[in-house]
Amino acid sequence: MMTKIKIHGPQKIDGVVQISGAKNAALPLLAAAILSDEGLTLKNVPPLQDVSTMLSLLTSFGATNHIKQESRYAMEVCIKTDSIDSFVAPYEIVKKMRASILALGPMLAKFAQCKVSLPGGCAIGARPIDIHLKGLEALGAKIRLENGYVHATVPSGLRGMDFTFPLVSVTGTENVLMAAVLAEGTTVLRNAAQEPEVVDLANCLNAMGAKISGQGTDTIVVKGVTQLKWTTYTVLPDRIEAGTYALAAGITRGCVDLVGGNFRELLPAFTKTAEQAGLVFEDTNDGTRVKFGGEIVPVNFETGPHPGYPTDLQAQMMAYLCLAKGESQIMENIWENRFMHATELLKMGADIQLGGSLAKVRGVKALSGATVQATDLRASFSLVLAGLAANGESVVDRAYHLERGYSRVKEKLAGCGVEIELMG
C-alpha cells in the first residue's frame, strides 16, 4: 500500500488526462446489483480501493463477480447475485468505507433482512445515517441499533410512501431509492439529492426495469415493480476527478485536456467559481480543456448540495487559492470537519484563518515544500496540488487515502509531464 508521496516542485502540468468512471456513482451501482434476480454488468468502473471494498462486501453476501480490464483506467465488472445467502455486512469490511451502508436498502428490498455494521471511512464529520434509517422505516422496515450494528427486517413487505428528507443526503437518497423500486405502490421522495451520481443510479435502475421519474430534481417518484432484470450499464465520468485535475492545471500555470465528458455541464457551480478564480474552460470533441488564465484571482464561495459547489472540490480549490492575489472566503456547509487540510497547508507557508465553517485564505507569493499529512481522500490531493506548486520537496504522508478515490495518479500526472514518487 502506498503511504507517502514525494514531490519536487514547482512543476507544470501540460497534457491529456483520461477521466475515469465516477467512484461516487460506481459504489451505489454495485450495490444496486443486489436488487436484480440475476445481477448486473457495469462498464467504465474505476480501479479503486473503494470499489474493491464494495466488491468484497458483495462477495461476503455470497455474490460472485468477474472483472475484465477495459483499459488502464477502466474495468468491466460482471456481478452475479443469484447465490446470495448471507445477510450480514461485517465490521471488518464496512469500517474501510462509509458507502458500505448502501447495501442496506437493496438487501431489505430483496431479502427483507440485513445486519450492517455502523460505517467508517474519512474522518470529515459525523455523517449520521439516521436519514437513511428514517426513510427505510417509512417504507416499512423495522430497525434497531445493537452492539455497533444496524439490525433491519421487513416483517410485512415494503410499501410506497411520501417521504421528505429532513436534510439533503446523497447516500440517503440512493439507499431509500433502491429500496423503493421493489416496494408495493408508489413512493415519492421529496428534498431528494440532485447530484449526477443519483441520476446515474436512477437511470441504471430504470434500465433494469424500475419505474423512476424526477431524478435530477428534488422530487423523485418511484412506482414499485416486482423484479429487476440483468442489464449492462456504463458508469458516468468522475466530475470530482475532472475538477481536481482542472485545478492542477491552474495551480501549476499549465493546461490540461480532460477526456471523457462535458465537465462544464457536470460541474456548473465549480466551473463558474473556477472561471472567476482565473481558469479558462473550452469544450473539445472528447471533453473539456482547462487553461491557466494568467492570474489566480481571489473568490468567495460556499459548498452546497448539487447544483451548488461540491464539497468534494473544496480542499483542492483552497490549495489553489493559497496563491491568489488577495483574500478568498470559503464557507463549508456540508461537513463540519472538512478544513483539516488547512493546518497542513499552513506548514507550506499558506495564510489561512479558520473560524467555524468559514475559512479566510489570503494569497501568498509562493508555497514552500514541507512534510504534511493527509486527513481524508480529497484533502490528500489538495496537498499534492500544493506540492506541485511549492518550491522544494514536499512529502504527503498517509497518502493511502488517495487510492480510495483517484486511479493511477502517478501515470496520469506523468502523461502531463509531472513526476511524483510513490513510497510504501
Image (cartoon, rainbow, N blue to C red):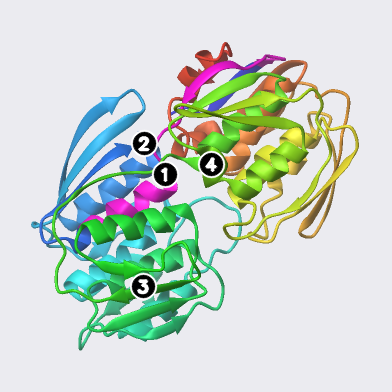
Q: Residues within 10 Å of mark 3 (few under 14, many from 20)?
A: many
Give the amino acid at mark 2. Answer: Pro
Secondary structure of the residue carrying tag 1 is helix
Give the amino acid at mark 3. Answer: Val
Range covered by the magenta-colored residues: 8-33
What is the distance, in whole Å, between disc 1 and disc 3 at their CAs? 25 Å
Residue 118 at what x, y percent from top left?
A: 42, 65
Secondary structure of the residue carrying tag 3 is strand
Give the amino acid at mark 1. Answer: Lys
Q: Choose the circle earlier in sequence order: 1 or 3.
A: 1
Residue 272 at what x, y percent from top left?
A: 69, 44
Front-most of residues 271 and 91: 271
Q: Choose the circle earlier in sequence order: 1 or 2.
A: 1
Please give the residue where the numbered disc 3 appears in the rendered image: 150
Please give the residue where the numbered disc 4 appears in the rendered image: 240
Q: Choose the circle earlier in sequence order: 2 or 4.
A: 2
- Asked whether residue 274 is drawn in magenta, I would say no
Query: What label sits on residue 23 in the rendered view?
Result: 1
Please give the residue where the numbered disc 2 appears in the rendered image: 46
